[in-house]
Image (cartoon, coloured by chain):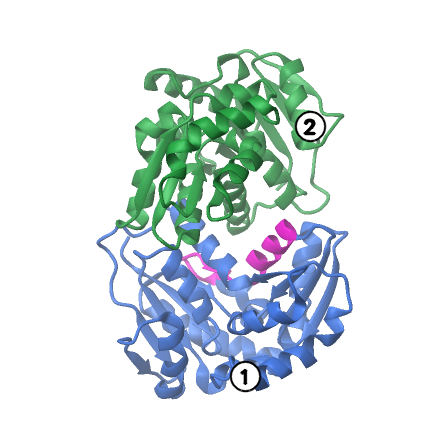
Chain colours: A green, B blue
Amino acid sequence: MSKAIGIMDSGVGGLTVAKEVSHQLPNETIYYLGDTARCPYGPRPVEEVRQYTWEMAEFLYRQDIKMLIIACNTATAVALEEIKTAFDIPVIGVISPGARSAIKYTKNDTIGILGTVGTIKSKAYEDALKDLRPTTVTYPLACPKFVPLVESGEYNSSMAKKIVAETLYSLKQTNIDTLILGCTHYPLLQPLIEQYLGSGVKVISSGDETAREVSAILAYRDELNSRHEKMKNKYYTTGSPVIFGQVAREWMNDQHMTIQQIKLP
Amino acid sequence: MSKAIGIMDSGVGGLTVAKEVSHQLPNETIYYLGDTARCPYGPRPVEEVRQYTWEMAEFLYRQDIKMLIIACNTATAVALEEIKTAFDIPVIGVISPGARSAIKYTKNDTIGILGTVGTIKSKAYEDALKDLRPTTVTYPLACPKFVPLVESGEYNSSMAKKIVAETLYSLKQTNIDTLILGCTHYPLLQPLIEQYLGSGVKVISSGDETAREVSAILAYRDELNSRHEKMKNKYYTTGSPVIFGQVAREWMNDQHMTIQQIKLP
């Protein structure tokens, strides 16, 4: 079934999901939308996030996709259930896959969660974890400085290293053995996070886990592309194609991608 | 949705999938059927495997399950597609999840596959891998001595160590960086296999990966149990409950399981 998979995020963070989908499903076509002009979603009021998320979802749906991934934790927490109910294609978010994977890895049932202010406030990960295993102890932590760092392309800098250390200091004092990167921007900071927390903490990228579930669900629905059905990926942004392209080309390892600027709604 | 997940295998091997389902989805109930009396399936003619697989599937289907896992590579290769088409519940096998995971891990596109004679002969893994990534180089290897070793409970013995080394000698001379345990019995030998091949080879258990997909598909269908819906697991075997119980109690870490002997068809 040669339709594309739609992936949407408040900015470039969802590219971590796109990259993993590309890697695990090289025959698939991706249409990516980053709402960079209105990024970050994390600190915004719920109603605003809901409206923006619907606008992105409807844009991608009109591109005739076969599946939609809400590759943004904030948007997933607010609008996944309602979009899933409204659309006639599978719609998946990033929270449940991340929670499921954390439960798989933890040995001491003590899990840290990093997210935006919105995601942490929603308690979406805590609910998902406790639904799966009621005894789980969680340490949620909002990291408002991380998204701007990634969106600006600064995720390798010495400033990034300093911000990671300052932000995670309190978490390092706990006995977590597993940490969920509950924001699709954070995998770009993953090397710094792992370095700071040390090898005793298994760091889980919700994005990677989501890609895994995309593969499972498309296979289950018999909707995976066969090897000659891949089309050219398309990238859309509501913001500057230059800044978007800077991160996207490096991250997706594709120097020839074309990026189209669009207006929402 | 408080129905059970049915898991079936030619013997005890599928318990590796059951264990992983229990771990990842502790709220779920498992009905397990091991056709121990007719194990192993690997060396049997295709028509016989097809008939036995259908008999197992129909037995579990009559227990009012919500999903069926064919936790046997040989049976998956022969009968997954037709059972999937015939049943009105999701039916998943172990081959695609294992192949998808191997593609995720390999860096040099060179993947080893261990399986029964039947599985290796079917080329099911090679087809699945090459569908995903046509350039993949595969080294398939039939290991007819492994299943009897596991079914007899001898998987920790010094004889097991010797058999693993002898069997995998030729594979050790290749440059594989990823190895699929293409039989649900083999994870019980995984420590010995990893020890023999060394840390340069990532060993993938199809069973673990299958459990992951079960979780994704049930979540997608909104059919995961809530926390109070767990019922008691049931274990069925066509063979001796004593021998089955010996491996099952240790492996599932459940000293109080009840095992019922049944007759197929």
Q: Foreground residue, A182 or A52? A: A182
Find numbered disc 2 in the image and state the secondary structure of the residue it sits on.
helix
Q: Which residues are magenta?
A: B84-105
Q: Which mark is residue A250?
A: 2
Q: Foreground residue, A109 or A182? A: A109
From the top left corner, tell me how far across and down residue B192 is, in percent: 58, 73
What's the CA distance linking mark 1 and mark 2? 49 Å
* Magenta-drawn stretch contains A239: no
Number of numbered discs visible in the structure rendering: 2
Q: Which secondary structure is most common in the magenta stretch? A: helix
Q: Residue furthest left?
A: B228
Which amino acid type corresponds to the residue marked 1 in the rendered image? Leu
Residue depicted at x 31% and y 33% = A123
* Circle 1 residue: B149
The quarter of the image holding the N terminus of chain A is: top right
10 Å crowding of disc 1: few (<14), some (14-19), many (20+): many
10 Å crowding of disc 2: few (<14), some (14-19), many (20+): few
From the top left corner, tell me how far across and down residue A235 is, in percent: 63, 23
Q: Which mark is residue B105?
A: none
Pointers 1 and 2 within a single chain: no
Residue depicted at x 48% and y 86% = B152
Which image quadrant is residue A250 in?
top right
Would residue B72 appear left or right of A102 to someone viewing this image? right
From the top left corner, tell me how far across and down residue A36 is, in percent: 54, 16
In the rendered view, tell whether residue B158 sits above or below residue B126: below
**Does the rendering let one see residue B160?**
yes
Chain letter of disc 2 in the image: A
In the rendered view, tell whether residue B152 sits above or below residue A144: below
Chain letter of disc 1 in the image: B
Which image quadrant is residue B240 in?
bottom left
Find numbered disc 1 in the image and state the secondary structure of the residue it sits on.
helix
